Amino acid sequence: MENRLRLLRAERNWSQQDLAERLEVSRQSVNAIETGKYDPSLPLAFRVAELFDLPIEEIFVSPSRRSSKAI
Amino acid sequence: MLRTSAWIRYNWRVVWLTLLYAGFLISAVYGFKHHLVPQPLKYPVAILPALPIIGIFVAIGKYLVEEEDEYVRMLMVRQVLWASGFALSLATVWGFLDSFDLVGHADGYYIVIAWFFGLGIGGLVNKFTLGDGGC
């Protein structure tokens, strides 16, 4: 799933490891989410949203909205 | 795989179970070879080496329950699926070849060896498909 995680992280000058520690997950998890190779569960997506103090949809791009935009 | 606390616990369990397996196997083989096992105990003694192997399956299940990092847990689930698919496919192919007398008969426990080999294949698939995230 496309997302703005890398951008949000860069704005705060956090490394993947910094973000992983804040989310209490592995650095590999952060990397996999950032690169779109892994879609986080809803509880983890909420943790990410709460950490950045943003609604989920401002971090993760809805696949259905993305495809409708493409049309 | 990442060294999470659940992973470390899993590894210790596997180490102890492997040692137990070696002990049970050597004892059972020695007992049978030297005719030390009385008739009523033959079945339980023959099954002894299987118990730690079953324990390893339980350890994998416990690991999947205890692992808190959902992504790392998914990696193990993928490995288990690869292992199961590989071992069952191999058993199916071998079974038919055996039925038509094209290969020799293999002992049933070879399926377990194939399954553990499949775990390794799953690890490689994770590595190649997920890159750095594949651990």
Image: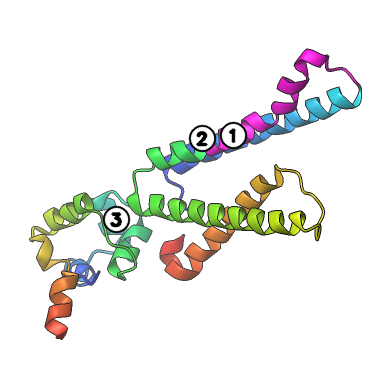
Q: Which colour scheme appears in the figure?
A: rainbow
Which of B53 and B133 lies nearest the eye of the viewer? B53
Relative image position of residue B41 (x, y in whole percent): 76, 16
Which of B97 and B51 lies nearest the eye of the viewer? B97
Instruction: Report the side of B56 relative to A56 (left or right).
Output: right
Relative image position of residue A56 (x, y in whole percent): 12, 61
Circle 1 sits on which residue? B54
CA distance separating discs 2 and 3: 29 Å
Secondary structure category for the residue under label 2: helix
The part of the image, by quadrant, that contains residue B5 is top left
Mark 1, Cα crowd under 10 Å, few <14 / some 14-19 / many 20+, is: few
CA distance separating discs 3 and 1: 35 Å
Q: Which residues are magenta?
A: B35-58
Mark 2, Cα crowd under 10 Å, few <14 / some 14-19 / many 20+, is: some
Name the residue located 29 percent from the left edge and 55 percent from the top edge: A20
Secondary structure category for the residue under label 1: helix
Name the residue located 54 percent from the left edge and 38 percent from the top edge: B57
Q: What main secondary structure does the magenta stretch of the protein show?
A: helix
Relative image position of residue B86 (x, y in whole percent): 59, 57
CA distance separating discs 1 and 2: 6 Å
> Looking at the picture, which amino acid does disc 3 mark?
Ala
> Looking at the picture, which amino acid does disc 2 mark?
Val
Circle 2 sits on which residue? B58
Circle 3 sits on which residue? A20
Dots 2 and 3 on the same chain: no
Instruction: Report the side of B7 relative to A8 (left or right).
Output: right
Q: Number of marks in the image?
A: 3
B22 in the magenta segment: no
Secondary structure category for the residue under label 3: helix
